[in-house]
């Protein structure tokens, strides 16, 4: 369950989902062409079936959780795969949004911190098949399932690294210096989130897009989000409640938007 007061504030003060009243041209284009794109892409079926298969699974795995854990399964060493798919892998509509964003921006290099079962990774890889996805997962059991998923769908543009973000980020950026798109979805604690943000910053360009998941997951994550959006390198942030979108282009006016999604 998300924090009540931020949730109420979001629904009272967020701007119209169609972009009416938004004067920032870049934000308005994103809202109209990406947020409100109702096209039924073929990739959605693939993503849907992958999630459905996990939801039907009777398998249990031992989980090594290096982050803040799960609200629904606190301190559980063994979890059902279907419960991970239901509670920890995100709402499918946000995976579809990731797919559309990557299709829109066409980043050559994408980095995901928090693979889980690989459903978000699938969205990134399918969104730009010509791009390269580096994804990091701390739990070996979840990583093994994700790797199996990627092989089943012959997704050769994904490289999965297993280990903590702090240890794996240097390995990623030893292979590629910059990332055009980053999905930060793991270790939901203020200190770790801000440390990951600072680690990523030197590898983000003016054109890069950073997506921070679960920004209203806890007071810690809300503080981390507010620190990120006020950073001197950040120009535009868009709060869609579940996620925060961060843009660094110095040509953009400094602005924080809350958009109903």
Image (tube, rainbow, N blue to C red):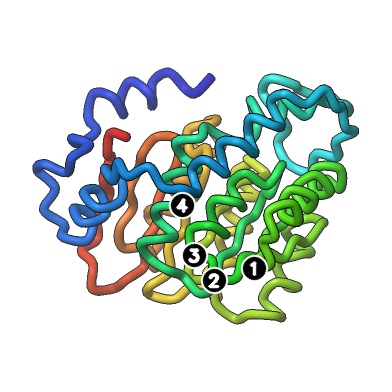
Residue at image position (53%, 57%) is 126
Q: Distance between the residues labelled 3 and 2?
A: 5 Å
* Residue denoted by label 2: 131
Q: Earlier in the sequence, mark 1 or mark 2?
A: 2
Q: Residue 248: x percent and y percent? A: 36, 67
* Residue denoted by label 3: 128
Residue at image position (46%, 45%) is 225
CB under 8 Å between discs 1 and 2? yes
The quarter of the picture where the N terminus appears is top right
Q: Residues within 10 Å of mark 4 (few under 14, many from 20)?
A: many
Residue at image position (32%, 48%) is 238
Q: Which of marks 4 and 3 is nearer the N terminus?
A: 4
The mark found on residue 157 in the picture is 1
Residue at image position (42%, 45%) is 97
Asked if residue 222 is positioned above or below residue 170 in the image, the reply reads: above
Q: Distance between the residues labelled 1 and 4?
A: 15 Å
Asked if residue 181 is positioned above or below residue 97 in the image, the reply reads: below
Q: Residues within 10 Å of mark 3 (few under 14, many from 20)?
A: many
- Left or right, residue 30 beside residue 119: left
Q: Residue 165: x percent and y percent? A: 72, 58
The mark found on residue 27 in the picture is none
* Residue denoted by label 4: 99
Q: Which of marks 1 and 4 is nearer the N terminus?
A: 4
Q: How crowded is mark 1: few (under 14 residues within 10 Å), some or many (20 or more)?
A: some
Q: In which quarter of the image is residue 174?
A: bottom right
CB under 8 Å between discs 3 and 2? yes
Q: Distance between the residues labelled 1 and 3?
A: 9 Å
Q: Which of 76 and 146 is in front in this view?
A: 146
């Amino acid at each position: 369950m998300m924090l009540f007061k931020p949730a109420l504030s979001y629904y009272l003060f967020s701007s119209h989902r169609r972009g009416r009243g938004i004067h920032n041209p870049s934000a308005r284009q994103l809202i109209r062409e990406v947020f409100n794109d109702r096209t039924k892409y073929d990739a959605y079926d693939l993503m849907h079936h992958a999630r459905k298969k996990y939801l039907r699974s009777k398998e249990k795995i031992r989980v090594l959780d290096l982050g803040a854990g799960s609200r629904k399964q606190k301190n559980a060493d063994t979890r059902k795969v279907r419960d991970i798919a239901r509670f920890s892998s995100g709402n499918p509509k946000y995976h579809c949004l990731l797919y559309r964003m990557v299709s829109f921006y066409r980043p050559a290099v994408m980095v995901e911190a928090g693979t889980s079962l690989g459903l978000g990774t699938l969205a990134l890889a399918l969104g730009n098949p010509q791009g390269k996805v580096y994804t990091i997962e701390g739990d070996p059991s979840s990583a093994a399932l994700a790797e199996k998923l990627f092989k089943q769908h012959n997704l050769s543009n994904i490289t999965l690294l297993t280990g903590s973000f702090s240890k794996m980020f240097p390995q990623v950026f030893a292979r590629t210096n910059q990332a055009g798109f980053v999905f930060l979805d793991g270790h939901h604690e203020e200190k770790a989130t801000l440390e990951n943000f600072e680690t990523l910053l030197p590898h983000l360009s003016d054109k890069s897009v950073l997506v921070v998941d679960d920004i209203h997951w806890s007071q810690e994550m809300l503080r981390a989000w507010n620190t990120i959006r006020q950073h001197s390198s950040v120009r535009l942030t868009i709060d869609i409640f579940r996620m925060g979108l961060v843009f660094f282009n110095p040509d953009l006016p400094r602005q924080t938007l809350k958009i109903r999604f």
